[in-house]
Amino acid sequence: MNKVVLITGASSGIGKSIGEFLAKKGYKVYGTSRKPKASELNGIHFVALDVTKLETITAAVQIIIEKESRIDFLINNAGMGITGPIEETPDEEIKRVFDTNYFGVINVIKAVLPFMRAQGEGFIINITSIAGYMGLPYRGIYSATKGALELTTEAFRMELKEFNIKMTNIAPGDFATNIAAGRYHAPVREDSPYKENYGNTLKLMDEHVDKGQDPIKMAEKVYAVMQKKKPTIHYKVGDTLQKFSIALKHILPDKLYEKMLMNHYKL
């Protein structure tokens, strides 16, 4: 019997790569999109789901359970980016990104857990970000959403062990996807005291994404982690410098690390 995988945000980017890769490996893959363009594409069976709308989460999970009677893997990939000076980022946009990147993930997990508990096993993988390990300038809100999910996963793992349900985080660095186009960008205001630094940092962030790695590397990592009987808590996927930056954060004094980040972003 093919294992059943549910991937949120599977219509593009990293989610699409993961879904297509797993389908080729023989998994029965269900991918979500707010408005699916097809019921099946490249091995991914699509269901409508908006992580910010609880009723769509419940409906999508129910559809899969009715068809398959189980969900073996949940991969929480759906998310959105946000950039801007924190002072100038509208409250409604801050709430929207938390609803997508944090509360939406929690609600999908809550919808799936009763079925995993009933079947006696399950594996949940949360796609976070290397940005979640540090407060990045002009990406502070995004860093906060991903950092919150990293810590919540640590707590969730301990709560779920007695039910034989595994959970882990996989944090990607910069990958060549359309995430930059889908971000909320706080406008670079002419009268803003942040105009020069924010404008320059925004260009640098977009360059990093454009020069990012192939999303297939994330798909390969997700597949490898799925095979582990005892996964660890945190995995990172990115170039050497990005992964090394996390190690440095644990080694360097806070102010020295802050200076290193500011030099990197030319602030």
Image: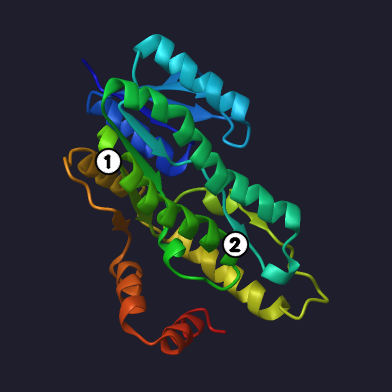
Q: For the residues carrying marks 2 and 1, which lies nearer the camera in this image? A: 1
Q: Which residue is mark 2?
A: 141
- In the image, residue 122 lies at what x, y percent? 29, 31
Q: CA distance from mark 2 to mark 1?
A: 31 Å
- In the image, residue 41 lies at what x, y percent? 42, 22
Element marked by disc 1 = helix
Note whether 75 is above or below 194 in the view shown: above
Note whether 7 is above or below 239 in the view shown: above
- In the image, residue 13 lies at what x, y percent? 45, 43
Q: Quadrant of the C terminus?
A: bottom right
Taking the spot 67% from the left edge, 56% from the top edge, the residue there is 94
Residue 193 shows up from this direction: yes
Left-right relation of 187 to 109 = right
Element marked by disc 2 = helix
Residue 51: image quadrant is top right
- In the image, residue 256 lies at what x, y percent? 42, 89
Depth order, front residue of 78/63: 63
Q: Residue furthest top?
A: 66
Q: Which residue is mark 1?
A: 161
* Tag 2 near tag 1, CB within 8 Å: no
Residue 10 shows up from this direction: no
Depth order, front residue of 80/231: 231
Which three-letter amino acid code belongs to the residue tagged 1? Lys
Taking the spot 37% from the left edge, 55% from the top edge, the residue there is 171
Which three-letter amino acid code belongs to the residue tagged 2? Ile
Taking the spot 40% from the left edge, 47% from the top edge, the residue there is 127
